[in-house]
Amino acid sequence: MLKGGAVWALGTMSGTSLDGVDAAMVLTDGERILEFGETRYRAYSEAERAVLRAALGRWPGDAAVAEAAEVVEAAHAELLAAFRGAEIVGFHGQTLAHEPGGRGTHQAGSGERLAGALGVPVVWDFRSADVAAGGQGAPLAPFYHFACARRAGADRPVAFLNLGGVGNLTWVDPRQTAPEAPGACLAFDTGPANAPINDLMQARLGRSHDEGGRLAAEGEVAETVLARFLDHAFFARMPPKSLDRDAFADLLPAVADLSDADAAATLTAAAAAAVARGAAHFPTPVRQLLVTGGGRHNPVLMAMLEARTGIEVVPVEQVGLDGDMLEAQAFAYLAVRVARGLPTSGPSTTGVPACLGGGRMSRPEALALQP
């Protein structure tokens, strides 16, 4: 089935912002993007989000993990059952803990159970092999960003910025022969993005996020807090590098004495300043930052990004891509690469010593495949 021809692949993403599950179809051979297909979204309920939040930072066998995995599996099975025509599924799962060089990485949810429920081969556990080999295990979308740059017709280096719970950058040179080629990609996490803002809104106002950046727009940035934030050791490390959702656990306490608006403004500025620090690592300058993820809907954050980086900042829709579904599409694309034995990460994207194909495939039982 996957010897080299294109197939319809279905990918999923449940990000660290804990908002819900994205799912998207892509027609791909694991190298090219030939067509974009159907997309769907399933929001987590407040009760489901509470279960997931209680399991953050926990590892397999810890309290609350089994319940979180059940939430993840049920939500994905419900959403993915609505799709037709997928020949393979890329299932990311829900990241609960990420500690490269330490305990590893933990995404809740079983691809085996999902394969049995859907009757379709499922590629999952994309990050563990990379971390075990000495890589950061993240970010994993860069090879897909390379394909996106080519799909968009880019003929010079360009950068993709994903603003989820954590921010990450991918610098891409689409003139190279493949994403794993030397000089084709440089990728790394930038620092916290939406997660601290969302946590602030939930804790203080009972809201999931700062809709349209309205609260941040009313506040003033606490520059002393921002300066302390930028002194964090993470920013002195050379890429590739990654971090856990709660790696900057002292950021929320740092704004505890600020008003709601000033705290939101400061956390928004922190996300933008972290990206600016990251952009200094680009091998060559870029003219545009193509922004994907929920953060691109925050005009205050987008304006702060442009002001702090000095680069034009635009949503990926401007080049014909879907910023809400790009991460889900990435795992559809990566699933096909895993099935074809192609690498999914390399030294310049996760810091793994050599190009590596992560992920494992679970096939449904023969009975589940019968009509």
Image: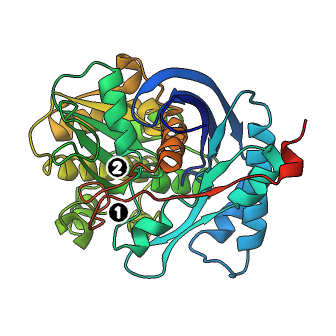
Residue 362 or residue 62, whichever sits in front: 362
Q: Position of residue 295 (x, y in %)?
A: 44, 38
Kind of element beneath mark 1: loop
- Residue positioned 60% across, 35% down in the render: 9
Q: Residues within 10 Å of mark 2 (few under 14, many from 20)?
A: many
Q: Residues within 10 Å of mark 1 (few under 14, many from 20)?
A: many
Residue 185 seen by the camera = yes
For label 1, the residue is: 242
For label 2, the residue is: 168
- Residue positioned 51% across, 29% down in the render: 5
Kind of element beneath mark 2: strand
**Image quarter in which the N terminus is found:** top right
Q: Are marks 2 and 1 in contact (CB under 8 Å)?
A: yes
Residue 221 seen by the camera = no
Residue 167 or residue 211, whichever sits in front: 167
| Residue 365 tag number | none
The relative height of residue 89 versus residue 249 in the rendered view (above or below) is above
The relative height of residue 116 versus residue 2 in the rendered view (above or below) is below
Q: Amino acid at mark 1?
A: Ser
Q: Amino acid at mark 2?
A: Asn
- Residue positioned 49% across, 68% down in the render: 128
Q: Position of residue 302 (x, y in %)?
A: 33, 33
Q: Position of residue 136 (x, y in %)?
A: 36, 66
Residue 112 or residue 320, whichever sits in front: 112
In the drawing, does residue 6 fall left or right of residue 112? left
The tag earlier along the polypeptide, 2 or 1, is: 2
The relative height of residue 274 versus residue 161 in the rendered view (above or below) is below
**Image quarter in which the C terminus is found:** top right
Residue 153 or residue 286, whichever sits in front: 153
Q: Marks 2 and 1, how far apart in space?
A: 8 Å
